[in-house]
Image (spheres, rainbow, N blue to C red):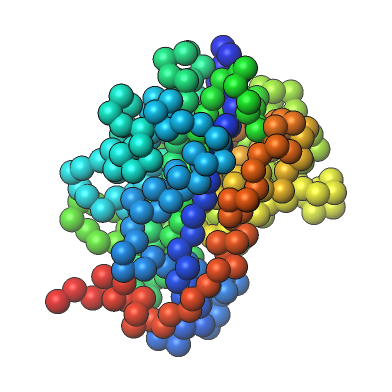
Amino acid sequence: MIMKTVNTVGIVGYGAYIPMNRLRASEVNRVWGGSGTPIEEKSVTAMDEDAVTIAVECARYAVKRGKIAPKDIGAVYVGTESKPYAVKPCGTIVAESIGATPNVMAADYEFACKAGTEAFQTCIGLVSSGMVRYAMAIGADTAQGRPADALEYTAACGGAAYIFGRKPDRTIADLEGSYSFVTDTPDFWRRGREMYPRHGSRFTGEPAYFHHVISAAKGLMEELGTEPGDFTYAVFHQPNTKFPIKAARTIGFGMDAIKPGLVVPFVGNTYAGSTLLGLAATLDVASPGDRILAVSYGSGAGSDAFSFIVQDEIANNPRLDPPVSVFINRKRYIDYSLYSKLRGKFIK
């Protein structure tokens, strides 16, 4: 069933952050004897970075871009599956860092890689109901992957933050509707006290990612009475380079049918930050009137689909803050030994 707001809610501000360190896929191949991968490199946190520091950076950029007072933010929710504390919320740290405390709701969200869009849903509902004026949703994660595992090539670090507000406040992209699709599909998990997640092997593709992403996207379009040709941009959760492209083609965004300008950006598998970073990269280049489809995916399993319509305010939105492309192009290469040390691969 489609979820629509009683009052018009939209994105007031957004911000992104990707660490500078990079690990080349060729370096992983050198150590473990791999034969190659379409992934060239991935972002890696520095010694003083984690999911919280990433979330704080994103939040600060979002506040600056939104041109609002932090005290007006009534809720801060952080979606992540790599929180630094087992018992202590990331949301309170972020709220304190941006100056939103003490009169603010704060919590952490969990649903694998769709934890960020799960926070979207709550923020949108709170703002639409009038319970708060502004609400912030963040998706931020750090790389998790067993040595020599396929995730060592794709699991990156980064995140994005979004502030939602209600008309008549100035919004840069209004929500047209959202749609969620969830089942209990065990494709990927990490039990308590385990350091690395495990794969459900054959469940990862067809019954997990594709079934949920495609069902959520088609469900949303059916309820809205739209079709692929009505969207200027499409963003899908990006666990690798192949899955989002295949999902786009299956839904109807075939390369021979894509209208000029449609983009399926790949910014890396940053877990809960993946779809949010893709959406941020799209907003960086979007124009008034563009319609954006954004579909997340979280193992376990579920997808959230959103349709946003870009508003005239996008032209007045300050683009002095770093766009996603700046973070992608800002690089410092490290070798596998330093990567292992930074990610705590080998513990004494």
Q: Nearer the viewer, residue 260 or 146?
A: 260
Vertical placement of 246 versus 70: above or below? below
Give x and y (percent) for residue 140.
42, 49
Give x and y (percent) for residue 17.
49, 55
Q: Nearer the viewer, residue 295 or 47?
A: 47
User: Is residue 18 something one can see in this rendering?
Assistant: yes
User: Is residue 108 something one can see in this rendering?
Assistant: no
Q: Quadrant of residue 95?
A: top left
Which residue is depicted at the point 36% across and 54% down?
A: 53
Q: Quadrant of residue 44?
A: bottom left
Give x and y (percent) for residue 77.
38, 35
Q: Nearer the viewer, residue 273 or 202?
A: 273
Give the position of the C terminus as an image quadrant. Answer: bottom left
Which residue is depicted at the point 29% across and 43% down?
A: 93
Number of labels in the image equals 0
Which residue is depicted at the point 39% across and 65% down?
A: 45
Q: Is residue 130 left or right of residue 37?
A: left
Give the position of the N terminus as an image quadrant. Answer: top right
Which residue is depicted at the point 57% across and 32% down?
A: 12
Q: Is residue 214 left or right of residue 193?
A: right
